[in-house]
């Protein structure tokens, strides 16, 4: 499994990096919209929408939401999308902590509405990051944060994992793995800060933001695991050998991107 994951990642990573560095803002917006719509197709199944026509309808509503988010971006009112998305992720943390207790997320309509909001908010956040001054660097950093949290957690959990993080949601994840992932995030931020010659105060703010974003990215992964467990599926899809579906790869980005962008906006970093 690890070998298959590495092979897929070695092919996927260059495609993602080309999308980040080689495409203009509009090209990146279209590229990430396509990725988001594939994720929407998979989210629809986790929402309880099993018929292809219903899943296509869900993808259409996500596309409409992306268009509305684009209008909010053009008018400078993006907080109408991003703040509700952050609130939903806070609710998701609450649902994860209470599982297997019941919650609003069990209703198909709630999961569907959450999907439309969270997918469109992630798209908006990533496009706004791309549009920032030195946007490529900030966009790269969030990818590195998510990857570092994931890879660090995987190897730390394998080596030192003892205490389960959320045993009812994802039995394989441990607290030691999460701590290892956060250490990897911290080292990544230090390397990024040194390379870009950031001031000491910017490094401090960026470190605090990145550690919170890294933690939230773990919650994004856990929330998708909760939805998959409820839907009775192992992976959101099969399009990526060794990794499952696209949603299995971008679930952390969905959670991390809105908070990361808002942090860069409100903190004296950029």
Image (cartoon, helix red, strand yellow):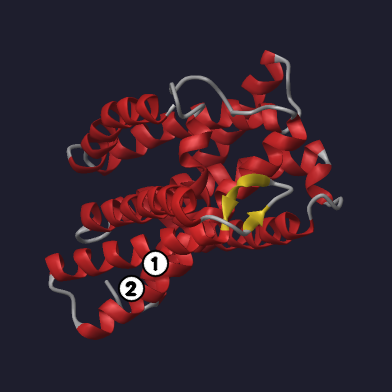
- Mark 1 to mark 2 CA distance (whole Å): 6 Å
Which quadrant of the figure has residue 208? bottom left
Q: Secondary structure at mark 2?
A: helix
- 42 w.r.t. 98: above or below: above
Taking the image as shown, residue 24 lies to the left or right of residue 186, namely left
Q: Is 175 located above or below residue 41 in the figure?
A: below
Task: Using the image as rendered, state which of residue 21 and residue 103 is in the foreground.
Answer: 103
Q: In the rendered image of this protein, does residue 136 appear above or below residue 64? A: below
- The residue lying toward the viewer, choosing from 38 and 177, is 177
Q: Position of residue 260 (x, y in %)?
A: 42, 62
Residue closer to the observer: 195 or 165: 165
- Indicate which disc residue 206 carries: 2
Q: Which of these two is toward me, 2 or 217?
A: 2
Q: Are marks 1 and 2 in contact (CB under 8 Å)?
A: yes
Can you say which quadrant of the picture contains the C terminus?
bottom left
Q: Which mark is residue 210?
A: 1
> Which structural element holds mark 1?
helix
Question: Where is residue 215 drawn, in percent x and y?
Answer: 51, 62
What count of labels does the image hold? 2
Q: Residue at x 41, y 71 (%)?
A: 209
Identify which residue is drawn at 84% across, 52% down: 103
Residue 62 x %, y %: 58, 35
User: Residue at position x 13%, y 73% from top?
Assistant: 197
- Is 28 displayed left or right of 109 in the figure? left
Q: Position of residue 186 (x, y in %)?
A: 33, 67
């Amino acid at each position: 499994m690890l070998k298959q994951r590495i092979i897929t990642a070695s092919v996927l990573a260059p495609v993602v990096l080309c999308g980040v560095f080689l495409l203009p803002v509009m090209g990146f917006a279209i590229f990430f919209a396509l990725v988001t719509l594939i994720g929407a197709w998979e989210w629809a199944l986790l929402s309880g929408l099993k018929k292809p026509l219903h899943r296509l309808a869900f993808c259409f509503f996500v596309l409409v939401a992306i268009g509305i988010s684009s209008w909010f971006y053009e008018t400078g009112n993006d907080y109408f999308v991003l703040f509700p998305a952050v609130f939903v992720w806070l609710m998701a943390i609450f649902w994860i902590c209470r599982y297997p207790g019941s919650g609003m997320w069990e209703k198909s309509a709630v999961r569907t509405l959450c999907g439309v909001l969270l997918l469109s908010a992630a798209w908006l956040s990533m496009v706004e990051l791309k549009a920032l001054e030195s946007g490529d660097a900030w966009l790269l950093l969030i990818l590195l944060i998510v990857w570092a949290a994931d890879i660090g957690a995987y190897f730390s959990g394998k080596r030192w994992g003892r205490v389960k993080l959320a045993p009812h949601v994802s039995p394989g994840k441990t607290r030691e793995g999460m701590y290892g992932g956060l250490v990897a995030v911290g080292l990544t931020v230090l390397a990024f800060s040194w390379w870009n010659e950031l001031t000491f105060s910017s490094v401090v703010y960026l470190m605090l933001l990145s550690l919170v974003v890294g933690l939230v990215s773990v919650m994004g992964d856990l929330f998708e695991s909760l939805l998959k467990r409820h839907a009775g599926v192992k992976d959101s899809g099969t399009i990526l050998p060794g990794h499952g579906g696209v949603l299995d790869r971008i679930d952390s980005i969905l959670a991390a991107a809105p908070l990361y962008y808002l942090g860069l906006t409100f903190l004296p970093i950029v």
